[in-house]
Image: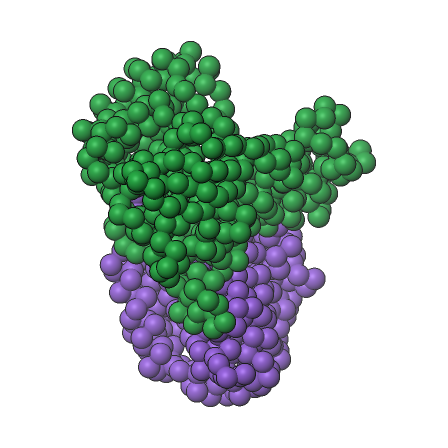
Amino acid sequence: MDFGLSEDQQLLKTTIGRFLAEQCPTTRVREIMEGGTGHDATLWTSLAELGVAALPIPEAHGGLGADLLDLALAAEELGYAATPGPFLGASMAAIGLAEGDNEELKARWLPQASAGSALGTIAIGEAESVWDPDAIAASVSDGKLSGRKPLVPYAAVSDFIVVAARDGEETGLWLVEAGAAGMEITTLSGNDMSRRLDDVVFDQTPARRVGDGHALERCLDAGLILISADAFGGARRCLEMTRDYSLEREQFGQPIGAFQSYKHQLADIAAEVEPCMSLYWYAAHTFDAFPDQTSKHAALAKLRIGEVFNDVAFKCTELHGGIGFTWEYDLQLWFRRALFDKAFLGEAVLHCDRVADMAGW
Amino acid sequence: MNLSYSEEYEVFRRKVRAFLDEHWTEADREKAGEAPILAMPRKQTDREAAFRRKAVDAGYLYKSVPRAYGGSEQPFDAFKSTIISEEFRAAKAPREIPGQGVAMLVPTLVEHGTPQQKEELIGPTIRGDLIWCQGYSEPGAGSDLASLRTKGELDGDHWVVNGQKIWTSNAAEADWMFALVRTEPDVPKHQGITYMLIKMDTPGIEVRPLKQLNGGTDFTEVFLDNVRVPKNSIVGKRGDGWPVSRSTLKHERAFIGSTDYVRKTFDGLVMLAQFTNLRGKPAIKSQAIRERLVSLEARLVAAEYHGKRLLTMSGHEEDTGLAGLITKNATSQLQHDLVSAALDIMGDGTALATGEEKAPFSGMFVDAYMWTFALLIGGGTTNIQRNIIAERGLGLPRDPATKR
């Protein structure tokens, strides 16, 4: 029984963490996120060189064929560093393709995605906070896709979009290429500038079938797990920043971290955050080891860790006093990322309902 | 990452199961029934005693006690311990005799006792022939235990002990008390304490039941009035009681961090929600309750896998660090939130007491709700744990104003 990381996994985590600390400190995060598209191709290529894009892609298609846990560990480090860019959508698109049954599309896109030379993204959610596969309304008929997807990461700079849509009764995944007819992309002003979101309307857009409802479910579950890992990394970062700050900042003749009330609030935050590591690890582990458990545990991880991240980001900002409320101080980066994690792929109440329904309550 | 045990451990599990099938029958299991969450020590039945002897011979019980004193003296293996725990629990088989004698006094004797003390006390304790109570807390010394004032003064060959202990579980049934007594009044407080072994039938000891908020009397007050204790009835040297006692408190905190009871509480909670109607429909159909149950389940799963992470670290003899330090608070607060949810599911049933048949499920959760104080306050209060988490886990400074 070994509920822990292998040496390789620890090495992966450390390597990515170190790379980001050196090559993507918050100064660079701000440059990229304040820039035009919020996407830095060089950064993505560098991450691809570390294998980040290749992790979820099968070896047969030029990837590393890793377990989802490995990708989730990468997600945690990216979250810890507030890394700007398309990691989440690209990962979900790759997983959607890999879980699907269209070998031609896999051969066409996965090797390039793995190398970081083609960028994919994912379009699932619909208006009024619809993310549940059964409730998807976008539809495909005769290879033409119509519908609106209001929150698509980096659609404007992606080479292909994997879209959740229904074909008659069945929901599944479809693929649309950049520049396809009838596609209107509007970039949104989001709270998290490090992860851009676009509103995409499809009107009779040519689309090719990637996979069925099962592929969609696997894609969604993987996404929920990756967001959970991101949220855990972000929460961990907020706690550490606040602890570090409290050792430096002095008032009333001592570091503010010496005051008992302050210590207690941080202790409570630590007690909330720490078990989240094991929650996302287990959810990620089920993806490969116990797939019949994944939908439930992916939803539990997302709803819990998304909430913890938001709660911790808020409290940590408050614990900083006035400086926490400035644009210049870095904590706001994670405060905003927490809002993305709370929303994307559906809010907590949606996932509570899904889990309750799965349990037959 | 692998939640299965390797072949070596699966073989071990099969051996344990085979042992249980042979020596603890279906009839035994039925008779045993459900174990209460906080079991109190009592004399064993002959059947239990016979089983325990065989289990010791097989190396399953009292693993950190040397064979010379009746234990099975096994090398430390966190995974084997877990497997034994799981299999014995599933078979409702007797494990170590519950209570502080086995859990706290025996490890202390193993580590610090004289050969004579080990010889005379360990065996009878683990066989259940000697029942112990813990004399630590006092009305004036709880979280600040080291400030304790029960006094021992040397008079010839005896200590004369005067003072009062509180929150002493099963003092009325106990044969002996292991107590912390101040014997060196002129040194700093942590250095003036002696770990004393006091026979409960010594003249001058009065045990009074302490009635609790939940109506029960699981705890007592113990008054010591010129109680004469033989000079050598101490563990370690005089004045060394504080470090001698430290090894045992870790045990108590670790136990309270285990997650089995929260899983049982959650399962009970779901059943309560399914079978309690609120205004014509089962509580579990209420949106608010469904959301609450799922949120709690997320925390429960997190706690369970956190436990597996800690077990893995222990198995590799790694320091559990911050992860270990937060466990008691996280788990006891989860339990509190679970039983609080039960109260809401019970609707107006919370007006009725546990045991009242007209209450939903005879009000079983009301007592559980009141009992959570024991989890939150005992074994190091939530606020003391917060200090420890902040100082040892997060590296924050100690409270500047506190006199240590």
Residue shown at 25%/33% (left/top)? B117
* Nearest the eye: A202 or B180: B180
Tell me the quarter of the image containing the C terminus of chain A.
Answer: top right
Give the colour in which the image draws chain A: purple
Residue B365, visible in the rendered structure: no
**Quadrant of the rendering where the N terminus of chain A is positioned:** top left
Q: Quadrant of residue B56?
A: top left
In this view, A166 is above or below A254: above
Q: State the residue lying farthest toward the front.
A: B156
- Pinpoint residue B271: horizontal percent, then vertical percent: 62, 32
Q: Can residue A125 be seen at all in this image of the molecule?
A: yes
The residue positioned farthest toward the right in the image shown: B279
Residue B44 % position (x, y): 39, 19
Q: Residue at x 70, y 62 (%)?
A: A128
Q: Nearer the viewer, residue A304 or B91?
A: B91
Q: How is the image coloured?
A: by chain
Residue A207 is left or right of residue A110, and the answer is right
Quadrant in which residue A111 is drawn? bottom left
Number of numbered labels in the structure image? 0
Q: Where is residue A264 shown, x and y percent of the image?
A: 53, 65
Estimate the x, y position of residue A125 in percent, counting from the top left.
Answer: 60, 62
Above or below, A27 relative to B322: below
Apparent side of residue A205 relative to residue B81 in the rendered image (left or right): right
For image coordinates 19% across by 35% down, the residue present is B115
Of the pair B192 and A301, the residue shown nearer to us: B192
| Left or right: A209 in relation to A188 | left
Viewer-side residue, A218 vs B344: B344
Q: What residue is rendered at 55% in x and 78% in y? A: A320
In the picture, one chain is green; tell me its letter: B
